[in-house]
Amino acid sequence: MSLPTRYLVSAPGKVILFGEHAVVYGKTAIAGSLDGLRTYMLFEKRNDGFLELNLPKLDLRYPLIWPISALPFSKVAPASKATDNTFSQELTFNEELLKTLKPIVLEGNSGNQNSQEINELQQVAASVFLYLYTSLEDKQTSWCGTTVHVTSNLPVGAGLGSSASYSVCLATGLLLVLGHITIPNYDERISDSNISDSSSPMNLINRWAFQAEKIIHGVPSGIDNTVSTYGGAVSFTKGVMENVSGFQSLRFLLTNTKVPRNTRILVANVRILHDKYPHIVVPILEAIEGISASFKEIINSGDSEKELNQKIEELIDLNHYLINSLGVGHPSIDKVREITAQYSLHSKLTGAGGGGCVLTLLRDDVTNDDIMRIMHALTSVGFECFETKVGGPGISVIDASSTINKQEFLSSSNMQQISGWKHF
Amino acid sequence: MSLPTRYLVSAPGKVILFGEHAVVYGKTAIAGSLDGLRTYMLFEKRNDGFLELNLPKLDLRYPLIWPISALPFSKVAPASKATDNTFSQELTFNEELLKTLKPIVLEGNSGNQNSQEINELQQVAASVFLYLYTSLEDKQTSWCGTTVHVTSNLPVGAGLGSSASYSVCLATGLLLVLGHITIPNYDERISDSNISDSSSPMNLINRWAFQAEKIIHGVPSGIDNTVSTYGGAVSFTKGVMENVSGFQSLRFLLTNTKVPRNTRILVANVRILHDKYPHIVVPILEAIEGISASFKEIINSGDSEKELNQKIEELIDLNHYLINSLGVGHPSIDKVREITAQYSLHSKLTGAGGGGCVLTLLRDDVTNDDIMRIMHALTSVGFECFETKVGGPGISVIDASSTINKQEFLSSSNMQQISGWKHF
């Protein structure tokens, strides 16, 4: 069987359900995948020996193009080359490769008749592409070049894991293109694909996505790429990640207040409060961890849908006030709570706070009319709203050789409804 | 020297500064006296063998009057009579005396030409008076009867300790009238009058006031009467009370939201949450105790006034959100916070929550104009405001024989500014 000539790949964004800030102090946080808010990539076969990256969502008007021959394959040690030992391979970050790629990244622009400035974010995105391609290149591929089209309905820089879903899609696509993994046969996500199974394709994707995240974030926690890869919900304690067993999915309204915030400063402010009032802040962080623990308990308690939702709403309120006690609330978040409370709905910030995004649990008894009214109220004060589910599939792929072409890809408004998505 | 023929007595109300709700679980709470929000009583000598109680503030239009001879002195065991062993005496509650007094209380109305209904609260207030008089009666007194006029600028039933200040005033006045203690010589409150000194007149007053509180509340904690007696600030942990050393006074705006609340139900709701989510609520209660501990630390830290106020504001905010996380907040409290925040001031509920009263720290740099504006904003949405100090003197007395008469007492708007108050 010949290899596909087009792959369509998608990976979800993430939200932190519980445990914001406490996670910095070694407490458990729980994150979930954002079903419907995803990055999509179309990988197209070329025969001219070139790599092409199209990033219109990052305001890159023209594609970046490199000859494969320009890549510094010599910087990748043969032992770390992807061969038979692909799945068991320990990945170490190749600092020298990244450094060597820096000038090459900018050359991707020189092939264009129309020159353009490449900003920091665009350079980083291109570096990730070239870093993964150089590391994963394998003589066995039948593709003599690749074009990648990227699109996404995830807001960038809103704490929703857009970079992780970018990394996961790229890792998945290049592992497919370069012959390390093949398209899976599963129509449904394998229930509770175990994060700790180190021999799975998902584990391989996740480890390469984590390398990509290092290029973007320096010292990422790894939770964003893990959630984006595996989907569902993942608990994270001191670097150890586990599937949240029993978690299916929860319907949420996700509101982006668009209030810019600086995560580093918010985290530093909590540290100052922690050091000033340890008798107070240490137990607050324990209480926040208690919310994560209670969430895992109630998910598996066998409660009815109604009881489950009621308890999650209680945890949402507890979390909201505890996070506020740490001084990282924001009037915009209170505003979302105020509006959604008018419809008896409960909201909490997600992420570092100080603005950013807010989650509102949409119970089954909420009517579509009410959801429209709430969304109208929220957008009319300048917020952006997404009706979404937390949970659901992580990385998804389709052999798009005979189905989706570039035009269809770029014009599609809801690629998740394409039939035929396969899951590892 | 002959005994005075009139005593003027006053005792403050109280607010809980920190530790609401957590105190129910054995954590430390801190309460302070409300300087300026006090109960005042004028005790006047009679020669006709009658006792008279005037309670206009409890809507009693006509005085209650009893012949002393109607009191059941036989129900008071000679051993528990107040004699030489007054100060060391262990007080046990005299259930039988209270029962015997029940019908006698109602007879207090029969001497009036104009009959009136006596409601539950008025009956309890009269019971306290007769219970204390019967228990403390001593043949050594030269007063052949007493008239008591009661007034107060404390809202009743707002969680501000109005009943405790009533009990403390009555205990003090009757201990004076019946010759157990004498008017002290101190113009200023003795700094840090030690609660644990069991031989002081204040200790005696406090123990009798506690008996009175039992008549009113059934199972009082004892903190209200202790704060009203000693003034200043008192910490309370599992029934053990201590002076908060180093505490002088803090200026607050006290706002009564007038939202009625049921302390019993609020306390029960926290218990339900505690039992449902122990992993979360137990550390929240520890964090609230941490606020009390931090308050005691910073009071003695030698910080400048500015630093001290800033830290107290941080504790106020922490306390506010932690109490809200327990589900006992209220929109009226948020409203006070919203209004005062417009002037960079910080507010917290005081007491059980669900409405009730709110404290706003008035830093020294707040102008009187701003205070007037804030009070205007708060009263215009239906709240009641008091500019007050927390801390300051507890029980205060004056020999009013030749100074304040009944008319002056009833017409005076600010008895605290009378000169000559003495303190134990």
Image: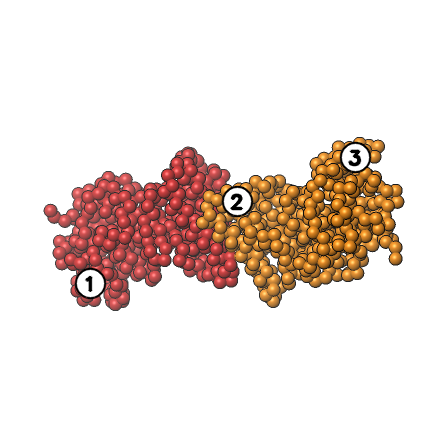
Chain colours: A red, B orange
Question: Residue B217 versus residue B19: which sits nearer the camera?
Answer: B217
Q: Are marks 3 and 1 in contact (CB under 8 Å)?
A: no
Q: Are marks 2 and 3 in contact (CB under 8 Å)?
A: no
3 or 1: mark nearer the eye: 3
Amino acid type of the residue that numbered disc 3 sits on in the rendered structure: Glu
Q: Are there few (<14), some (14-19), or many (20+) residues within 10 Å of tag 2?
A: many
Whole-percent x, y for residue B400 in the image? 83, 53
Q: Is residue A272 left or right of residue A59?
A: right
2 or 1: mark nearer the eye: 2
* Residue position for label 2: B270
| Residue name at image x 74 percent, y 37 percent | B100
Same-chain status of marks 2 and 1:
no
Chain for numbered disc 2: B
Amino acid type of the residue that numbered disc 1 sits on in the rendered structure: Ser
Q: Quadrant of the C terminus of chain B?
A: bottom right
Same-chain status of marks 2 and 3:
yes
Q: Quadrant of the N terminus of chain B?
A: bottom right
- Numbered mark located on residue A80 in the image: 1
Chain for numbered disc 3: B
Q: Is residue B204 left or right of residue A210?
A: right
